């Protein structure tokens, strides 16, 4: 069941190609804008779109790292409603991309 929560206002959302950390109800997310779309992934370690320690890059669509690593973070649905950016804290099911 969806659980939509405001994480920031539209004016606070990241600009194209940028990310911000947002928190609501004790849940921390990495909110990113890519190709005009907002995306949210779990901000718990491994916690960045590109991890500063391992340089792992995470897909904003699936939450899975690029090969050869196979680490994964949860991916959340995002929507804008009025001036609010909402995240559904029920993780979307991410499938492993076929190779």
Image (cartoon, rainbow, N blue to C red):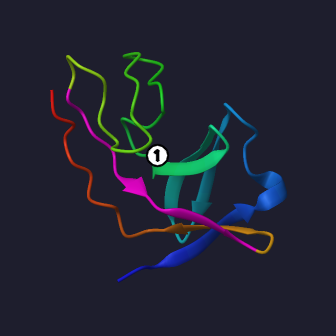
- Asked whether 61 or 91 is in front, the reply is 61
24 lies left or right of 59: right
> What residue lies at 41% left-to-right and 24% top-to-bottom?
57
Q: Is residue 74 magenta?
A: yes
Instruction: State which region is magenta.
Output: 70-81
Residue situated furthest left in the rendering: 99
Q: Is residue 9 magenta?
A: no
**Residue 72 at what x, y percent from top left?**
27, 40
**Residue 54 at what x, y percent from top left?**
36, 16
Please, what secondary structure does the residue beneath circle 1 have?
A: loop
Q: Is residue 53 above or below residue 38?
A: above
**Residue 45 at what x, y percent from top left?**
37, 38
**Residue 95 at what x, y percent from top left?**
21, 48
81 lies left or right of 61: right
35 lies left or right of 69: right
Q: How many marks?
A: 1
Residue situated furthest bottom in the rendering: 1
> What residue lies at 26% left-to-right and 51% top-to-bottom?
94
Q: Which residue is mark 1?
A: 43
50 lies left or right of 56: right
Q: Is residue 51 above or below residue 10?
A: above
The quadrant holding residue 93 is: bottom left
> What residue lies at 44% left-to-right and 68% top-to-bottom?
89
> What residue lies at 78% left-to-right and 75% top-to-bottom?
82
Report the quarter where the C terminus lies: top left
Binning the other alpha carbons within 10 Å of mark 1 as few (below 14), some (14 to 19) or many (20 upward) gives: many
């Amino acid at each position: 069941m969806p659980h939509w929560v405001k994480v920031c206002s539209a004016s606070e959302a990241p600009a194209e190609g940028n990310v911000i950390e947002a928190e609501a109800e004790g849940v921390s997310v990495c909110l990113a804008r890519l190709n005009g779309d907002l995306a949210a992934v779990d901000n718990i370690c491994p916690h960045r779109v590109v991890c500063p320690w391992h340089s792992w890059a995470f897909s904003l669509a699936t939450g899975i790292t690029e090969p050869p690593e196979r680490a994964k973070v949860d991916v959340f649905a995002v929507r804008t409603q009025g001036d609010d950016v909402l995240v559904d804290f029920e993780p979307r099911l991410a499938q492993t991309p076929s190779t």
